[in-house]
Image: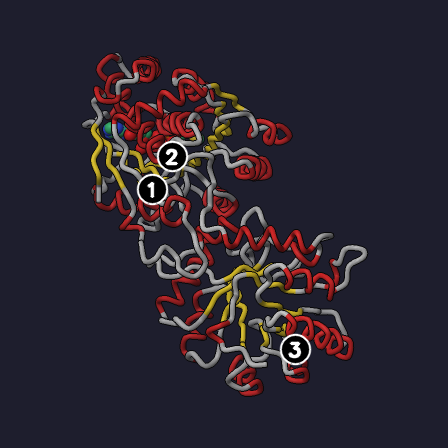
Amino acid sequence: MVFAKEDVNYSLYLVTDSTMLPPGTTLYSQVEAGLKNGVTLVQIREKDTETGSFIEEALDVQKICKKYNVPLIINDRIDVAMAIDADGVHVGQQDMPIPMVRKLLGPSKIIGWSVGKPSEVETLAKWGPDMVDYIGVGTLFPTLTKKNPKKSPMGPQGAIAVLDALEEYKASWCRTVGIGGLHPDNIQRVISQCVATNGKRSLDGISLVSDIMAAPDACAATVRLREMIDRTKYQFVDCELNESFPTAVSIKSVISQVSSNRPLVQHVTNKVHQNFGANVTLALGSSPIMSEIQSEVSELARIPNASLLLNTGSVAPIEMLKAAINAYNEVNRPITFDPVGYSATETRLCLNNNLLTYGQFACIKGNSSEILFLAKLNNDKMKGVDAGSGKNDDALLARATQIVAFKYKTIAVCTGEHDFIADGTFGGECKLSSGTAGVTAEGLPCVMIENGSIPIMGDITASGCSLGSTIASFVGGLDPTGNLFDAVVGAVLLYKTAGKLASTRCQGSGSFHVQLIDALYQLFHENKPEKWSASLKKFN
Ligand SMILES: Nc1ncnc2c1ncn2[C@@H]1O[C@H](COP(=O)(O)OP(=O)(O)O)[C@@H](O)[C@H]1O
Ligand SMILES: Cc1ncsc1CCOP(=O)(O)O
Ligand SMILES: [Mg+2]
């Protein structure tokens, strides 16, 4: 049977592994359970099996695949693929060179190649459309399936770089499957985040091993995976993700929701910010808990209207930070991420990039240096945690905010004399292959908030961190019908207005802290956004 290459469905790609079969199951029962319930492509990968046994297994798996009209790909073993007339092979960078594989298999067979970096895409593009039909993009996340992996996991940002290379080198024929550590808790985030920068393509499929091969009930496991992959909405928070332009009325509604829901705001934050952040949270009718206790984070995340502020100013143990991300992502409760001093040291850069790869954030906020660096628009190391003194123009800052929002499919906030907020959530819409239908970062809703210069706001510590507390309170206090963009914009607008008010009342930076809390308290409880002094305008 020859499959027309354009008809191959890469969406749910099962790679076999007989070393993880649960009791009472066989390689064949697991493969058939997968095929019955939505697996669209099978790769038999048996690294430790003798050739004779491998051929027998491959012939039996082939019979099952033919029953379901699904192509069978052989991992690595070109000889076995030829011996049984399989539908194709998948080879790694260290295996037989692709041109030789193509020469042996002929033009009609499917050839897959493991690709981990853009330079390998450049190579396949040079070979042209007759060589590689699809690439396995990975290893995305740490995995036990691949023994002694040669490269560290690339994460969604690494996959985006590969997708960008396919666009850059015009390898439009080449399909892509994500591979490595993919599981129900990250599949939708991967489909949502792994989009080429030009918005024109996303991954064509998800490749899985253990979630089916090691499943006691492989049928149910496959049904669940199929449903997740076919879902075109990644609802990562319990609120509305639709793009809308905030108004005084919608912000007033946000504050009413926060006031009545009194969100629990868990702060994992730096020592400098702790006390001030707790008092800002209380001033906003919310309930702070400053906790880095790993064993309680799941319990806290399940409290109604729980919200997490993850501030890496002075760092909690990475295990605790990841446990917190998992806990809140698992129950669709919002996480506000503040990568303080993002590029100040290698340690911070590595830690923050690790966390950005590990979870989904409702909001990522930072000062101009942090956001410019995240957007790769400024590679200067930060000196400490404060924004650089250089004056950046609004257009550059707005673009950086949009790029961060797009890269992480989040609401991005860039603070400074002018604050910028961009909505990269696409309302949660995400699809295999089609990317964002060509919408790019520049096309994202973006607003600018200003209230004139308030230099004293930059003269106190934890002023940005406490904007994080404000955002976390607002997004945490939303009803399920509330709107995430309205909440973040409302928080930033309130905070800017309060800063201005406090600056007119204080005697210096010491009393400014106190006046800022007073102003936040008064403005929040008054809830008259139409009277606030800070202005809001669309930036695109
Ligand atoms: N010169 C300024 N004029 C007006 N607002 C400012 C100014 N500097 C900072 N802010 C405000 O102070 C808060 C902290 O911003 P920033 O200093 O950029 O963050 P960080 O404290 O994280 O470095 C934000 O709400 C921002 O809008
Ligand atoms: C001084 C300092 N050191 C580590 S975190 C921190 C506070 C940073 O607060 P902000 O980001 O609001 O300026
Ligand atoms: Mg900061």
Task: Find out whether the residues at labels 3 and 2 contact each other: C-beta distance under 8 Å.
Answer: no
Q: Is residue 524 visible?
A: yes
Give the image quadrant in which the ligand numbered 2 is located: top left
Does label 2 or label 1 sit earlier along the sequence? 1
Residue bearing mark 1: 423
- Label 1 sits on a secondary structure element that is strand
Against 333, residue 186 (above or below) is: below
* The label number, if any, that marks residue 77 in the structure image: 3
Q: Nearer the viewer, residue 67 or 527?
A: 67
Task: Find out whether the residues at labels 1 and 3 contact each other: C-beta distance under 8 Å.
Answer: no
Does label 3 or label 2 sit earlier along the sequence? 3
The location of residue 367, given as percent across then percent down, is: 33, 36
In this rendering, position of residue 268 left or right of residue 453: right
What's under tag 3, amino acid-wise?
Arg
What's under tag 2, amino acid-wise?
Leu
Q: Dot 1: within a 10 Å radius of its alpha carbon, few (fewer than 14), some, or many (20 or more) residues?
A: many
Against 479, residue 53 (above or below) is: below
- Label 3 sits on a secondary structure element that is loop
Q: Dot 3: within a 10 Å radius of its alpha carbon, few (fewer than 14), some, or many (20 or more) residues?
A: many
Which residue is at a point 41% across and 79% down the rendered structure image? 128
Residue bearing mark 2: 484
Q: Nearer the viewer, residue 81 or 33?
A: 33
Quarter of the image where the C terminus is located: top left
Q: Nearer the viewer, residue 235 or 537?
A: 235
The location of residue 174, given as percent across then percent down, is: 44, 71
Task: Find out whether the residues at labels 2 and 1 contact each other: C-beta distance under 8 Å.
Answer: yes
Which residue is at a point 39% across and 72% down the rendered structure image? 171
Against 159, residue 102 (above or below) is: below
